[in-house]
Amino acid sequence: MRTFALAAVFAALAAPALADPVEGTWQTRPDDNGNFGHVRIAACGAKFCGTLVRAFNGQGQPIDSPNIGRQIVWDMEAQGNGQYANGKIWAPDRDKTYRSKMELSGNTLSVSGCVLGGAICRSQEWTRAD
């Protein structure tokens, strides 16, 4: 029993060290309406998802948004070396879902994606907010 308890303690202490570097809260760039948000990215199964946790107007003032709590990034798969692919990102300002990928470099997360077979593409750089 004592061995089991020690193993449980070591496992609990090791869990934060196993977190993927992309996990955390990211500040988006202003959208077409001038608003931006904080997106919390976390593991969801073997992939990564992101939920809008805060929204701000163009002056940086918090705003109530019906999208707070909504998952806007999903199905991102770690590819190694800071690369993530095969995911989707929903853009609230255009109400479009993009087939997406992300690239992590330090405290910058480059997100990009396309709709309609690649005819409409967007990209943004998000910065770490936590």
Image (cartoon, rainbow, N blue to C red):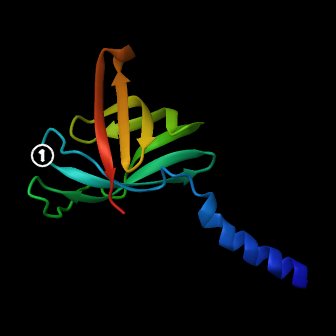
Q: In this view, does 122 lie above or below 21?
A: above
Q: Where is residue 92, by image quadrant?
A: top left
Judged from the image, the secondary structure of the residue bearing numbered disc 1 is loop
Q: Which residue is drawn at 17% across and 61% down?
A: 63
Q: Where is residue 16, by image quadrant?
A: bottom right
Q: Percent from the top left, x then y, of residue 118? A: 36, 16
Given the current orientation, which residue lies at the most extreme front position?
106
In the displayed structure image, the side of residue 48 where residue 105 appears, left or right: left
Q: Which quadrant: the N terminus?
A: bottom right
Which of these two is toward me, 94 or 87? 87
Q: Residue at x 89, y 79 (%)?
A: 3
Within-10-Å neighbours for mark 1: few <14, some 14–19, many 20+: few
Q: Percent from the top left, x then y, of residue 77? A: 56, 38
Which of these two is toward me, 113 or 108? 108
Q: Which residue is drawn at 20% across and 62% down?
A: 64
Q: In this view, does 29 lie above or below 118?
A: below
Q: Which residue is drawn at 21% across and 40% down?
A: 93
Q: Percent from the top left, x then y, of residue 20? A: 56, 52
Q: Percent from the top left, x then y, of residue 122? A: 28, 28
Q: In this view, does 118 lie above or below 130?
A: above
Q: Residue type at mark 1? A: Gly
Q: From the image, tell me which residue sits under label 1.
A: 34
